[in-house]
Image (spheres, rainbow, N blue to C red):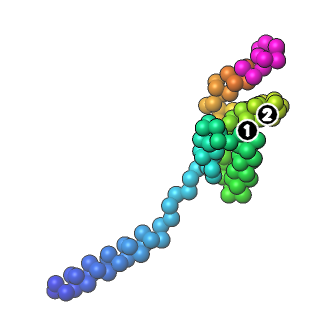
């Protein structure tokens, strides 16, 4: 009787461990790549805008290949990096893409767009 109980428990433990080994982890919603490390390096002064842009373009390609969207802030950060290099058309394009992908960012994006347009003398 005890032997059968132990055998049954052992079989159940083995079955549950086998089934849990087959369970897959949920996939992340976004493809982050090295985005956070890139931002950190930029803000610490370890990488310049051009290096950052190249890394962010690579992350975008990886995300596309993985079939996942880029995370919040990536396009806005890329836009700001483009702005630092004087490419204001790409700054605006990336900020607008950020706002489209993440509508909750519209207040911040609008603030950045307004701030970007002030040095050029145009009022909004």
Indicate the position of residue 42 as horizontal and vertical percent values: 65, 39
**Which is nearer the eye, 101 or 94?**
94
What residue is at 63 percent from the left and 30 percent from the top? 105
**Which is nearer the eye, 121 or 47?**
47
Indicate the position of residue 103 as horizontal and vertical percent values: 65, 32
Q: Is residue 120 magenta?
A: yes
| Magenta residues, start to end | 115-124
Per the image, the residue denoted by label 2 is 85
What residue is at 22 percent from the left and 82 percent from the top? 6
Residue 105, placed above or below residue 124: below
What residue is at 68 percent from the left and 58 percent from the top? 66
Question: Who comes first in sequence, dot 1 or dot 2?
Answer: 1
What residue is at 64 percent from the left and 42 percent from the top? 46
> In the displayed image of the protein, which residue is found farthest to the front?
46
Per the image, the residue denoted by label 1 is 49
Distance in Å between CA atoms under marks 1 and 2: 7 Å
Disc 1, disc 2: CB below 8 Å? yes
């Amino acid at each position: 009787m005890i032997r059968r109980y132990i055998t049954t428990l052992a079989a159940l433990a083995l079955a549950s461990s086998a089934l849990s080994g087959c369970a897959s982890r949920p996939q992340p919603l976004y493809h982050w790549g090295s985005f956070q490390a890139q931002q950190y390096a930029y803000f610490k002064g370890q990488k310049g805008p051009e290096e950052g842009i190249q890394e962010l373009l690579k992350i975008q390609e990886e995300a596309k290949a993985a079939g996942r969207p880029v995370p919040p802030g990536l396009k806005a950060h890329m836009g700001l990096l483009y702005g630092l290099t004087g490419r204001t058309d790409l700054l605006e394009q990336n900020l607008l893409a950020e706002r489209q992908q993440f509508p909750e960012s519209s207040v911040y994006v609008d603030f950045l767009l307004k701030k970007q347009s002030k040095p050029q003398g145009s009022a909004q």
